[in-house]
Image: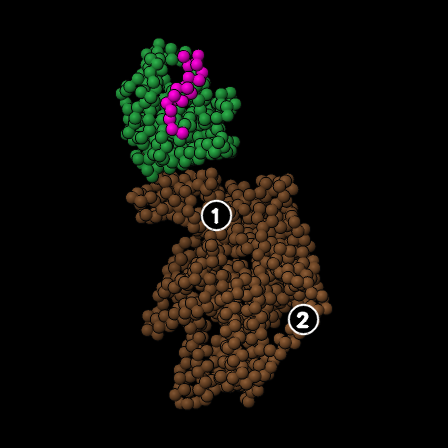
Amino acid sequence: MKNADPAQPAEWLSGVPIKPRWQAHPLLRKLLLLVAAVMTALVIAVPLDVYQQFTFGGVTVIAALWIRRSIAGQIGVMLLVVLSVTASLRYMFWRLSNTLDFDHLLDGILGWGLVLAELYALTILLLGYVQTTMPLKRKPLPLPADIGTWPTIDVFIPTYNEPLSVVRATVLAAQSMDWPSGRLRVHLLDDGRREEFRVFSQAAGAIYLTRPDNSHAKAGNLNAALARTQGEFVVIFDCDHVPTRSFLQLTLGAFLQDKKLAMLQTPHVFYSPDPFERNLNTFRVVPNEGELFYGLVQDGNDLWNAAFFCGSCAVLRRKALLEVGGIAVETVTEDAHTSLKMSRKGYNMAYLAIPQAAGLATESLSAHIGQRIRWARGMAQIFRIDNPFLGRGLTWGQRLCYANAMLHFFYGLPRLVFLTAPLAYLFFGAQIFQASGVMVLTFALPHILLSIATNSRLQGQFRHSFWNEVYETVLAWYISWPVLLALISPKLGKFNVTAKGGIVKENYYDWRMGSPYLVLLLLNLAGLAAGAWRLLAGDGSASTVVINLVWSLYNITIASAAVFVANEASQMRSTPRVNARLPATIHLPNGRTLVCETRDLSTDGVSLALPAETSVKLGEKFNIALSSGSFETVLPGTVVSEGSVIGIEFAALTVTQQRELAQVTFSRADAWLGEWGRSTIDAPLTSLRNVLSFGGANLLRLSLGKGFGMPVKLRRDASPPNHP
Amino acid sequence: MKVIAIVSAKGGVGKTTFSANLSMAMSRAGVPTLAVDLDPQDALHLHFGLSMPCGDGLVEATLTGMDWRHALLQSEFGCDLMPYGQVEEEDREAFEHLLREQPLLLRQRLESLNLPDDAVVILDTPPGPSVYLTQALSAANMALIVVLSDAASYATLPLMVGLIQRYCLNRSDFNDYAYLVNQVDHSRQLNSDVAYVMRTQFGKRALGLVHQDQAIPEALACNQFVCDYDQHSRGAADLKLICEQMLTRLALSYRATA
């Protein structure tokens, strides 16, 4: 593969709209680049007094806001990125050269702590721009017309302790994928060695595999299966990720056209809300944590041939996998590490942003945090033992993208620094920022505002401003230590399976999980009081106090929202549920029928919208016919809720009936397309208002001693949703 | 005028009930519709709430040389009806003899009605090969083969296709034939499987299916159109869908031949 020189798009970039408009002589191009570099350096470094800097910053911000409004498309994004990078580098240059002249040891220690956190944030900002400014937006490639040339495929569904009710739909749907029947083998990899699973596999016609021990957990389980199968391609689904019938036909074409393609990843989509969404009541309104990653980051990685394997909903070429010794076992994020190893061997990676499977989100905050700790620890392990900046075989684009994927998880400590930094001055009067308040504002505000505006433009479809600060704040405390530990000694750490399919029976506050944010909240509240006292006593420069007070207020808002996340809202449903309007018919025991339409479906039951002025009785039993296209299945059920939309619970279904149900529900090619990446587009001010009102309302509740109730309903943004 | 022959190789597939329901549905869709009963059982008129021997029917009209226009009955469901009529055995034999001698008799008589261009004539026929079937196929612009999703129906498919090839496919005014699978019950595995096989085999000629639904015989017993009797039933929904399909196909054929 060629190097990713932007002027010379590599072959795998063909089709990406970055063809130069005119061809300059190479020498001229180098000259222009040199001029641009000198000019940029000048803009970054030239000293200005406070009025000049104020004017410069103001003009930059106004220009950015104008661009954001007026210039659509890639050019607008590029201009914003250039302005944002320049403003941020100018701030950091000034910060390093003018504000670190500390008088006291304490000021020095705290001050350097802050500047290091800022350097980290700047690095992530810049890497993020490299990674996401031009997402590849790959399209599926067609398979050859001759079905005889389609390759053989082994599907691996690893499971350890998940209930059969979760695994069943995945196996049946995987078997229902459209592929020549002799060339698709579905394997259930049971590390729990459960009789119930063996019996089910046999009834369903899936291959049941076990191994004598559980060494290396999921990675070991997959490798054991790899040794016992021969298919040209391996497809991996976590046991709760139910694929659609079109999964293989959309993903395999790329492999047949690019013989060096080793891995293609598709998005992880969740049909249930994660703890953030459930506890903050933001499901389908504010994009969740994962949407940024699968909506933009992986697509951006793909441009640099650095999309990486995420453990599920992906296709791998067996030959490439065997060349790196199977799934990596050295780290707890075996998926990303396996990708890195295959990239080093010169294989290509791909990402296709079409949801072709959906799974269960983590069901509680503690499980969610446990999962993120594992990811953070694993990424730190890779950074330590197989650093993407070192070693052979990677392009610079790949090195930067992989590095960002790992460094991203180091945000814990810097985030805690930001959450406590204003306290240094408010409590102790420590001058950790050696500059006047006004000067700080004139440099810092353009940097902050431009990065918000630019990221909102880049990511607005998949991430809402400020909400990710809440996400990060919640996780910061928990991932800081494991990351540090893994950096010191990669061996420290144990794989923990993310529990899925559980239910939270009633609302409760998880005090154990919530306590760090409560402490942060109280500290900042105390800081607020200290600041107020300083103002009244006329102690210190008023502008410095005010800046620190505003900072502290912002921290209080974020911490209040974070505190709410530990307020576990009840969650009754534990099985996949698809929203779909399919034609259905109720077959009453007297032979009469009632035509209706589904509202949602799961493996346990279905909601049906009845025609006006019709009704059925609670507890009534009858058959329900569900159809999708020309396919129709009839399933027995009982009415469990009345109204214009009734709830039906299915009776015990045979394996054949379960398979047919999977075919009309989860297997439909469009099953998961409807809701993914379609949250309202970000408007930073609306987001800020939402977070503020959230944190504020929560704080008020707490201070009035009312404890935690159900969160207020979010205001939807005024801007139209992003689909046509 | 477009003539649709409702045919089947096997008896008891629900042809007459379907013919009546389709006529009513077409008429409800605003299409001038005439239902013609070519079956000596003379049962079609029962579906239109005309239970007593009424008028002369097409046998009497033909044998006495009466203008067919005077033998038409108006039903309360909007469509017109030409019953077979209750006839003596010798009249039936004489009529069938006439049909054998004049293979295009039905076609000519229908043309003589001078129905509007957008009118539809639905011919109900007796099961299996007969002189009535020959007449119907010779007059038809479209043939609809009614089958049940069972092995017996499946086995008789070639017979009917053979007849259609002989009487219809060589005519330029013949659109095409299609299949209707009647009384489908997906809760029975064999029934469901045969329906699936048939649908696959029929391809584009699969017009649709009518599910097993108690509302259909009940509507008949109550002298009501099934869509009025139970508007939310599967049967009513299936019928509306088939009617739409049929009209689409006929409209296409207009354009194709023009």
The residue shown at (63%, 40%) is A146
Foreground residue, A409 or B129? B129
The residue shown at (56%, 75%) is A88
Q: Position of residue A578 (x, y in %)?
A: 44, 50
Q: What span is in magenta?
A: B98-117
Q: CA distance from mark 2 to mark 1?
A: 54 Å
Q: Residue farthest to the right? A: A27
Of the chain colours in the picture, the one used for chain A is brown
Disc assigned to residue A170 = none
Foreground residue, A5 or A617? A5
| Residue A464 shows in this picture | yes
Which element type, helix, strand or loop, lies under badge 2? Answer: helix
Q: Position of residue B176 (x, y in %)?
A: 49, 28
> Which amino acid is tagged 1?
Phe
Quarter of the rendering occupied by the N terminus of chain A: bottom right
Disc assigned to residue A666 = 1
How is the rendered protein coloured?
by chain
| Residue B211 shows in this picture | no
Say which residue label 2 marks.
A32
